[in-house]
Amino acid sequence: MNNLEARRVLADAEMLYSAAEVNLALQRVARDINAQLAEQHPLVLSVMGGAVVFSGQLLPLLNFPLDFDYLHVSRYGNEKQGGELHWKVAPRENVRGKVVLVLDDILDEGHTLHAIQQRVMELGATKFYCAVFADKIHGKAKPIQADFVGLELPNRFVFGYGMDIHGAWRNLPAIYAVRE
Ligand code: IMP
Ligand code: MG
């Protein structure tokens, strides 16, 4: 998407959550994780690239010792429709014996997080938690539920706060939906 197209998409979009609302949700998630994982010394795995904003803002709010690493898996590629999973950086041996907390931008159908959970547990993690900044509500059963959720979103294509639209606008501090 070129510069002009990206600006037009944003100008035509509907803001679902303002930056202030996003920030409040982030604080809530941090508080819940602090309450639940403080004594577990988790390995925190950030799912690139969508979780980069959520991870970058969440980590400094966590007040206990943790290890950090990342995964890179994409499902959408550059399409709006869900598709095949591509592992660019898969979970590795350092999850063995650890409590793992995976951070992702959005739980949609749940295939991505479910596949990550399976790999992480196969590699010998002792416990799996996941935090997603957004949970898309679409009424269909999901193969995995998130332990920590920032915001609920309608079943629309959204972007901002780490989520991209055709590669653009991960950098927005608020969450937008393409107008229908
Ligand atoms: P799932 O496997 O259907 O849960 O898809 C989850 C992944 O798809 C997330 O990690 C996002 O990267 C991406 N995704 C799902 N919905 C959206 C959306 O509305 N906008 C941007 N990315 C999305
Ligand atoms: Mg993603």
Image: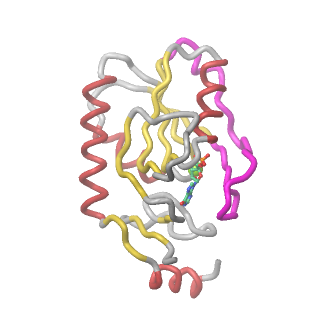
Residue at position x 49%, y 65% in the image? 159
**Picture layout, residue 17 above or below residue 56:** below
Magenta highlight: main SS: loop
Q: Please tell me how many numbered marks the rendered image carries.
A: 0
State the image quarter where residue 161 is shown: bottom left
In the picture shown, does residue 126 fall above or below 62? above
Residue 40's x, y, as percent?
A: 37, 17
Q: Is residue 110 above or below residue 17?
A: above
Q: Residue placed at 53% from the left, 53% from the top?
A: 50
Say left or right for 135 vs 93.
left
**Magenta segment:** 72-98
In percent of the image, x 69 and y 64: which residue is there? 79
Q: Residue at x 34, y 24 (%)?
A: 65
Inspect the magenta stretch and tell me whether residue 91 lies in it.
yes
The spot of residue 169 in percent (x, y) is 51, 69
**Quadrant (top left/top right/bottom left/bottom right) for the N terminus:** bottom right
Color theme of the render: secondary structure
Give the x, y percent position of residue 113.
58, 37
